Amino acid sequence: MLKLLRGLTPRDEFIIVVVVAWAPAIVASIYAAITARPGAPLFLEIDFTVLVIEELVTMTGLAFFLHARGWTLERIGLRPTGRETVAGIGLFIITYIVIQLVWLAAALSSPSVQQAGTAINTVEGRINPLSGIAVSIVNPIFEEVFLCGYLITVLKDRFGTWTAINVSVGIRLICHLYQGVVGVIAIVPVGLIFAVYFVHKGRLWPLIVAHILFDFFALLSFFS
């Protein structure tokens, strides 16, 4: 089995990782965007439980696959330290400010954008804090490991920095299309800042920390 996995080409490896990690999310996001009803909640509490289980299973399988292929945590820049945690908090603050400025500019230029922002319904009812905390940890790790740690590392060496950044941002955006215009306005700045940071610093933990803070604070008001 290990011999078979190690015998795959880099192209085969890339296709397997991208398809396994992102094809289900892309299909689900596009379907949700097409069938979305105005004012309907984006998530139910059960959705968070399902997402955590799915991502843990997928991440475990891909971790085994990539380890067999010679990948290490250091290769994707993942080494949690106190200093990188502080850097992640700073990255969160900077990215949040940028998002607010982009949102303000978009809202001032289009009344429909402002209306979309006030009409968005994130979660139906209240959620168990454990569910909110679990998804706020697992989902950021999953997304940043495969959108930046793996994808950018592979693409920047073969196709250049900006191709890697654009592909990473593009997949991130498609996976959040279900959030509508509000998601687009928020996800593009986040994707760009995170991707550029990773390209220049080569460190993944600050991205994970910043993403955890974004998800946690977004769900905090729904905790029961």
Image (spheres, grey):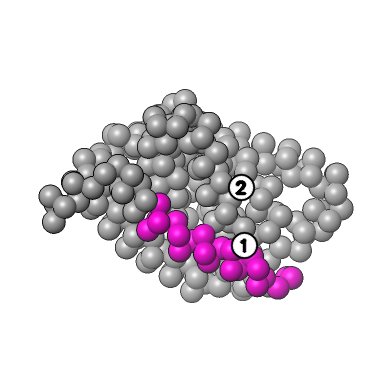
Q: Is residue 15 left or right of residue 165?
A: left
Of residue 211 and residue 167, the one placed in the foreground of this image is 167
Callout 2 secondary element = helix
Q: Which numbered disc covers residue 16?
A: none
Q: Is residue 189 above or below residue 111?
A: above
Q: Indicate the quadrant where residue 62 lies.
A: bottom left
Quadrant of res 103: top right
Q: Vertical placement of 177 versus 128: above or below?
A: above
Q: Which residues are magenta?
A: 18-39
Q: Nearer the viewer, residue 65 or 206?
A: 65
Q: Looking at the picture, does residue 100 appear above or below residue 59?
A: above
Q: Within 10 Å of the Cα at label 1, are there few (<14), some (14-19), or many (20+) other Cα atoms? A: many
Q: Is residue 90 left or right of residue 40?
A: left
* Label 1 sits on residue: 178
Q: Left or right: where does residue 119 sit relative to residue 6?
A: right
Q: Amino acid at mark 2?
A: Ile
| Residue 187: image tag | 2
Q: Is residue 34 magenta?
A: yes
x and y percent of residue 146 in the render? 40, 47
Q: Position of residue 220 (x, y in %)?
A: 57, 58
> Measuring 41% from the left and 42% from the top, which residue is drawn there?
151
Relative side of 44 to 138, left or right: right
Going 81% across and 47% down the picture, which residue do you hit?
107
Tell me what residue is drawn at x 55 percent, y 43 percent: 169
Quarter of the image holding residue 108? Answer: top right
Of the 4 image quadrants, the one containing the C terminus is bottom right
